[in-house]
Amino acid sequence: MTWRRPDRPLRLAPATHDDFRELARRRLPRQLFDYVDGGAFAENSMRANEDDLHSLRLRQRVLRDVSARTLETTVLGQQLSVPLVLAPVGFAGMFAPRAEVLAARAAERTGITFTESTLSICGIEEVAAATSRPFWFQLYVMKDRGYAEDLVARARAAGCSTLVLTVDLAVPGRRFRDSRNGMNGGISTIGQYRRKIDLATHPRWVREVALGGKPLTFGNLERAVPAGRVPQDFQRWVAGQFDPSVTWRDLEWLRSLWDGPIVLKGILDPEDAREAVANGADAIVVSNHGGRQLDDVTSTVRALPAIADAVGDEVEILMDGGVRSGLDVVKALALGARACLIGRPWVYAVAARGEQGVVDVIESIRADLMVVLALTGVANVNELDASALESPEWGRG
């Protein structure tokens, strides 16, 4: 077997999420790969997100006219060519040069929506200047409310169409991979030495991302976090800004700042879903933060049916967590979601192949969907319901 440098991608045409993940693993320094690849505590909920989707069984149906199939849908009035949204991912610009811009362009090319994270390397204005399609902006409510208000104003000025409020991060989850790799700081001298070796064995990443192009700054937080601050210092600052005092009452404050759609991301419980509706949310994302916050909580696809039953007639419901293919998207839609958000898949893809990698991931899911619709006897993605599944004990109906 031929030995390959750890920063050299495999010579293959990536076709699946796993292909892009492997290419990203080879290209990225270990601490960065583990940052996006890992979860909280023992990572049980992160694994359950995927495992529970895999446990669902589709119903194959035959002799139905599926010659004209459509994947188009709308979310909050915005047309999507595929029921997908690129999820907000903090630090994304650490995985490829100007990764948020690349992902936003890929979303525009494929007719879907990109969500800019508060913790992005590329600022809101840079993404807006590189695209013409409105994108979403994800907000953390910080202790410094003035900074949050400034971010909302910047998002409005940049033409963002939707505000996504992440509500499951009152405090950061315990992510042991980050602790071991020093992403949270506090590693030993030996650990620092190993990290330097890790960077030295990934010269392509160093050349293209760390040293190439614009400096690595946190574009949406550059007033608070000066250029050149290392990720560990930045994470400490951010951790100090997360506000565990935020309550449902803060939605009224946010609504006073933003007159467009507001999406609450991080809902896992039907009672919280009802509270979201009562407090004016236009949509919710059933999410456990990709398994990166509280471990041993239910997977998102298990939580989805009860939430859809509780509020599905009142707000649009999206889902993220474990979505890796068009099969996963069909299962989520069958259980009550209108569309799915994907995070890790687009980050692996942008790390491996840049903008084209993100396009390829989206197009792979599109191709999956066209096949799955045909073989389940469904011509329109908006007509998917629980009849497309062999009902699990925790499913709808």
Image (spheres, rainbow, N blue to C red):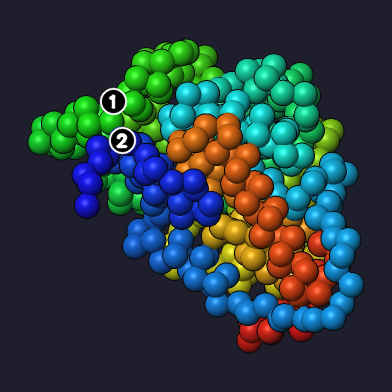
Q: Is 391 above or below relative to 330?
A: below
The residue at which mark 2 appears reads as: 7
- At a point 39% along the width and 49% down the height, the residue shown is 22
Examine the image and state in which quarter residue 216 appears. top left
Q: Do the residues labelled 1 and 2 touch (CB within 8 Å)?
A: yes
- In the displayed structure, does residue 16 sit left or right of residue 81? left
Identify the residue at image location x=37%, y=39%.
Answer: 9
Q: Is any atom of residue 397 visible in this view? A: yes
Please name the amino acid that badge 1 sits on: Pro
Total count of labels:
2
Q: Foreground residue, 263 or 159?
A: 159
Give 203 or 223, whichever is nearer the viewer. Answer: 203
Alpha carbon separation for disc pair 1 and 2: 7 Å
Residue situated furthest front in the rendering: 1
Residue 307, can we see it?
A: no
**Label for residue 305?**
none
Q: The C terminus appears in which quarter of the rendering?
A: bottom right
Q: Mark 1 points at which residue?
A: 203
Q: Where is residue 335 in the image (x, y as percent from the top left)?
A: 72, 71
Residue 130 in the image, given as x and y percentages of width and height: 68, 19
Residue shown at the point (46%, 61%) measured from the top left: 46
**Amino acid type at mark 2:** Asp
* Residue at 77% over, 24% down: 132
Question: What is the residue that sits farthest to the left in this orientation?
Answer: 190
Image x and y of residue 149, in percent = 67, 25
